[in-house]
């Protein structure tokens, strides 16, 4: 096996701990494996704190540089993902304090495309609806919801990232889920499977045409 193929194989099969050891041992190229593996998690965490894709991207870049510089201090008390996410959240929070803006959650890619234009349009609308509803949650509830339900950290990991207790995580998550469900329920009741506009007019036209026919059928 050639050197490049061997390195690629290693990148896709080694654990975070093994990859970190390789980086600390002098193979800086292996750091790309960690970035590719956890980039989406860190972006989502930063995007949950910041209100802008570009700002979140800048925060992620800065966070990865901080992760690289501090890599030798990683002791494995928590998973690398949790450790790196906490660094990203701290970076994003620092930037947020600097500009005093509210936060949002990333759900842009939470809906996969099926190749069906109508389905893709529906998924896009649903994703935007979720973004708006999650954005309306209070800051603390929103951050917990993103870390637990979007990034899928456990309670202890979320508590570590946000510097709050596990019980606070559970309480905020329960309240966030309840508030989100209630908000979505109200909106969906008004908007799901609407039958108006062109669709309503089309059926109305057909019904009236049938009624006006000399011998209207059933």
Image: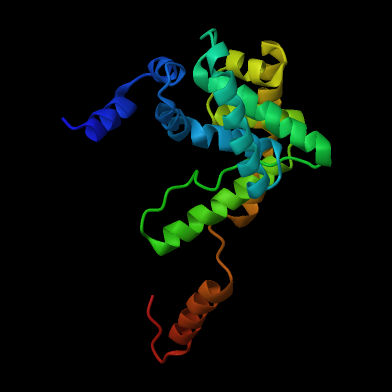
Tell me if 119 is positioned left or right of 132 in this view. left
- Relative to 90, say whether 184 is above or below: below
Q: Is residue 185 visible?
A: no
Q: Residue at x 55, y 51 (%)?
A: 126
Q: In the orientation shown, which residue stands out farthest toward the left?
A: 1
Tell me if 98 is positioned left or right of 135 in this view. right
Q: In the orientation shown, which residue stands out farthest toward the bottom?
A: 214
Residue 1 in the image, given as x and y percentages of width and height:
15, 30
Q: Nearer the viewer, residue 90 or 157?
A: 90
Quadrant in the picture for the C terminus: bottom left
- Relative to 86, say whether 74 is above or below: above
Q: Residue at x 56, y 29 (%)?
A: 149
Residue 120 in the image, given as x and y percentages of width and height:
45, 57
Count of labels in the image:
0
- Relative to 81, say whether 218 is above or below: below
Tell me if 113 is positioned left or right of 147 in this view. left
Q: Residue at x 66, y 28 (%)?
A: 89
Q: Is residue 127 visible?
A: yes
Q: Quadrant of residue 180?
A: top right
Q: Nearer the viewer, residue 1 or 208?
A: 1
Residue 26 in the image, given as x and y percentages of width and height:
43, 20
- Relative to 95, say whether 55 is above or below: below
- Please say which color scheme the image uses: rainbow
Residue 124 in the image, given as x and y percentages of width and height:
52, 55
Q: Nearer the viewer, residue 121 or 159?
A: 159
Q: Residue at x 47, y 79 (%)?
A: 207
Tell me if 116 is positioned left or right of 133 in this view. left
């Amino acid at each position: 096996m050639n050197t490049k193929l061997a390195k690629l194989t290693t990148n896709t099969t080694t654990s975070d701990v093994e990859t970190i050891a390789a980086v600390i041992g002098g193979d800086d190229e292996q750091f790309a494996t960690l970035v590719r593996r956890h980039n989406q998690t860190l972006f989502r965490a930063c995007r949950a704190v910041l209100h802008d894709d570009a700002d979140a991207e800048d925060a992620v870049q800065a966070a990865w540089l901080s992760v690289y510089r501090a890599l030798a201090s990683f002791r494995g008390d928590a998973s690398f993902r949790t450790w790196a996410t906490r660094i990203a959240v701290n970076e994003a929070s620092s930037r947020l304090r600097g500009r005093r803006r509210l936060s949002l959650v990333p759900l842009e890619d939470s809906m996969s495309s099926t190749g069906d234009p109508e389905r893709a349009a529906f998924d896009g609308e649903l994703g935007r609806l979720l973004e708006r509803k999650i954005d309306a949650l209070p800051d603390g509830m929103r951050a917990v919801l993103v870390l637990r339900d979007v990034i899928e950290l456990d309670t202890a990991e979320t508590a570590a990232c946000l510097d709050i207790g596990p019980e606070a995580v559970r309480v905020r998550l329960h309240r966030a889920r309840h508030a989100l469900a209630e908000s979505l329920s109200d909106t969906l009741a008004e908007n799901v499977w609407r039958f108006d506009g062109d669709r309503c007019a089309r059926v109305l036209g057909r019904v009236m045409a049938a009624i006006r026919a000399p011998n209207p059928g059933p």
